[in-house]
Amino acid sequence: RRESAMKQILSSRTLDIPSGVEVECKSRAVRVKGPRGTLSRDFRHLKLDLSLKTNEDGVLQLVVESWYGSRKSLASIRSVCSHVSNLIVGVTQGFRYKMRMVYAHFPINTNIESSGQKIELRNFLGEKRVRRVDMLEGVTVARSDKVKDELILEGNNIEYVGRSAALIGQSCLVRKKDIRKFLDGIY
């Protein structure tokens, strides 16, 4: 039987909060408010301490601490900092994903409805079926003006923007053909 791994007494990591962004941290639920809106995320499933403090230079910081953590719980410290950093970038700059429509013969036609909330994909591999994809909350889709056959997805929440891009990509998968030869799709 393997002996239990040695636990570290205290591990912590800090994240600087830029000016113009308000961060609330209440019972491991983080709410970030900025010029583009408000985002929140719940970390109650992790055994971590989240607190706000001001350092010597007067900069507000989020402190993530783990007491007597195992290897796995120590790994979640940096994950929490990355998630909160993504929330801060989302409410200040936002996120943009670019996707290209790839086809060899049948051009993929797109129709964007309800001000970028829905997209219809037609003529994929010459099929008659119309594929409809709803964007997730706060995500808008648009066709690029400068680049041919390019879709641009924009939003504040990186998870929703990435998942909306995945939904579009997964709606155009080639079935019952050699995918090395039929490279059509939206990537």
Image: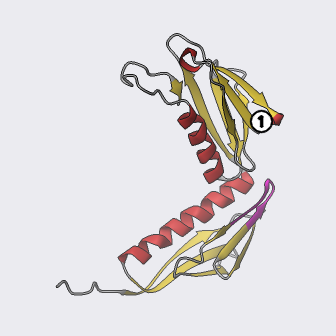
Q: Is residue 161 above or below residue 49?
A: above
Q: Which region shows up in magenta?
A: 32-40
Viewer-nearest residue: 113 or 155: 113
Q: What residue is drawn where x is 36% and y is 22%?
A: 178
Q: Is residue 31 left or right of residue 102?
A: right
Which residue occupies 71% across, 51% down? 156
Pointer 1: residues within 10 angstroms few (<14), some, or many (20+)?
some
Task: Give the secondary structure at mark 1.
Answer: helix
Colouring scheme applied when the structure was drawn: secondary structure
Can residue 38 be seen in the rendering of this structure?
yes
Is any part of residue 21 visible from this angle? Answer: no
Up/down of 93 relative to 6, above or below: above
Q: Amino acid at mark 1?
A: Gly
| Quadrant location of the N terminus in the rendered image | bottom left
**Residue appearing at x 74%, y 36% in the figure:** 118
Dividing the picture into quadrants, the one containing residue 123 is top right
Tell whether 22 sits left or right of 105: right
Q: Quadrant of residue 55?
A: bottom right
Is 27 situated above or below 120? Answer: below
Q: Position of residue 125 (x, y in %)?
A: 53, 17
Which residue is situated farthest in the left direction here?
1
Give residue 81's position: percent from left, percent from top: 55, 67
Give the residue number, with chain letter if any, for mark 1.
116
Judging depth in this view, the residue of 3 and 176 nearest the camera is 176
The answer to if 178 sits in the magenta stretch is no
Q: Position of residue 14 (x, y in %)?
A: 56, 73
Q: Is residue 175 above or below residue 138?
A: above
> Depth check: 7 or 101 in front?
101
Give x and y (percent) for residue 139: 72, 45
At x 66% / y 82%, what residue is drawn?
Answer: 27
Residue closer to the observer: 105 or 10: 105
